[in-house]
Image (spheres, rainbow, N blue to C red):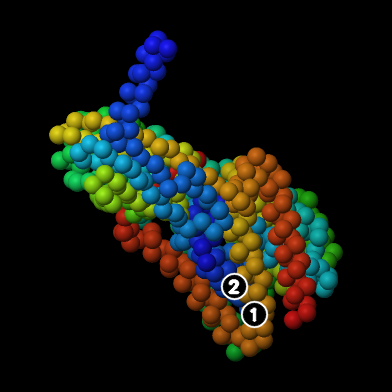
Amino acid sequence: MRARFFLILPFVLFISSHAQAMAIDVSSDIIKVTTGFNGAAITVFGNQEKEGQLVIVVEGPPTNVTVRKKGQVMGLWTNTGSRRFVGIPAFYEMAASGPVDQIAPEDTLRTNRISLTGFLSSSSGDNDADYAPALVRIQNSHALYTLKPVGITYVSPQLFKATFDLPPIVRPGAYMVSAYLFQNGAMVDKGQVPFEVVPEGLSADLRRFATHSSLLYGVAGVLMALVAGWLANVLLKRD
Amino acid sequence: MPVYLPIAEMTVNAFGIISLGMIVGFFSGLFGVGGGFLSMPFLMFVGIPPIVAVTTQNCQIVASSAAGVISQWKRRRIDVPMALHMLAGGAGGILVGIGIFSLLKLLGQIDFAIAAIYTLLLASIGFSMLYGIARGFIARRQGKVNAGENKIFNWLKTLPHQNHYTAADVTISIFGPMGIGFLSGLMISILGAGGGFLIVPAMIYFLGVPALMVTGTSMLQLLFLSALSCILHSLTSQSMDLVLAMLLIAGSVVGTIIGLRASKYIKGLPAHLLLAALVLAVAARMGYDLLVAPHDLFSLVVED
């Protein structure tokens, strides 16, 4: 009996201490991208037992992105340079209870992926400092990256929530919500909850069809077009 | 009404795309042109990736040329052997075109190439239309009729494999139709347009095909070429968006019916001028992007 108690004690202590500092959850763990999909909102809510500043990050699946830069060649504007970014998140938004640079030092933020600059270093191509900011700017214009963290709302001194908007062009895949609790610049607790963006319904079936049996898919498209053409002909005759 | 395009991976307004299909159909009904030259630039402005725009446009051309082929077939205005020879050249054109497309995409120059080719082609076609209208006007006044003979026609007469095309009633080397087919295949696989603007006059002037037989014959080869290009693009890059294609086709069927009705009222000189103006307007819009400094120097391509 006594031995058993000592066996589970560390776990009890771990869970309780963990739960005491901070715990989070998301409004839905699956976002379905259907044919009528026009973006979605995901709300992160949580409980904070200790005092401190919060930062919440929502990160999308890793992607490879090429940024191209236009220049003038013989009077015509065309792409003249490029830089490839490997393994950068398809989506990266942040919420914070205050200005992030005052919550924790730069190094702490970067090692915990609470900064975009860390991701953008793994790239190759033109050595032009303009590419990384351009990438962030364009992703931001598509509502995929935040330049300025959104606020965290406190429902009570302990209960907080933050809402993130996923735009219609959001990439399907595994997403991760990470919340960090800081006290005097040091991280005291961290919580993670995953969610998934899944294509579903007709659009998902079509995509599977197109990638897995592309020959049949192409032929099916042509056949449908032929039927439509024939139908148009019948309609025209009746006209 | 927002609709998510599964292949283009973006949400578009369904009514916007149907309207585009209707406008394209309207003009193809009104002028008897394919209309690919209108929808390709528009799809690219909307932000559909060029490869998806081309492949989907191929699918839409299958529908429009099928409708045309059925009605021309009934009137016996198709020279099948000539269409087959054009098709043989066209298949080669598509294979080369798909290779060129992939290369340009890899180099990041595909948008530039499409815009540049469209600008050049449409501007020269638009101006030659205006020139033709002016010359036809003068010729009619002076009672002259344009003779169909020219250097290329005579040169094709000297090439080997002369063949008599019975329906078109013309004897010419099979390399003539094959060459024009090759050009058509290149255009359909790179530009997503059938190139009727070039193919139809080329068949009349260089092959000596009677005007009555040109539309049906070129449409038959276009039907097979667009189907082939659509299937090959779907196979190599999985880039055909069926949802987008169906929206475009639905709109264009309705638009064609309206256009055909309108063609009873708008014809002759005003119709020719309108078409020339439309072609030049698209050329100007495409050329604008090449000549004027872009709003944003940077663009972004996400890999699959």
Q: In this view, does A209 lie to the left or right of B164?
A: left
What is the chain identity of the residue bearing mark 1?
Answer: B
On residue B22, which mark appears?
2
Mark 2 or mark 1: name the one nearer the start of the chain: 2
In the shown orientation, is residue B158 left or right of residue A102? right
Q: What is the three-letter code of the residue carrying label 1?
A: Ile
Crowding at dot 1, Cα within 10 Å, few <14 / some 14-19 / many 20+, comes out as: many
Chain to which the residue tagged by mark 2 belongs? B
Mark 2 surroundings: few (<14), some (14-19) or many (≥20) residues within 10 A: many
Residue found 50% across the figure and 45% down from its top: A30
Q: Which residue is drawn at 26% across and 38% down?
A: A49
Badge 2 and badge 1 in a common chain: yes
Residue B270 in the image: x percent, y percent?
56, 85
Tell me if I can see residue B81 in this picture: yes
How many numbered marks are there?
2
Q: Do the residues labelled 2 and 1 touch (CB within 8 Å)?
A: yes
Rendering coords of residue B184 (x, y %): 64, 56
The residue pinned by badge 1 equals: B258
Residue B85 placement: quadrant: bottom right
User: What amino acid is labelled 2 in the image?
Assistant: Met
Q: In which quarter of the image is residue A193?
A: top left
> Residue B251, how many percent across, how many down?
62, 70
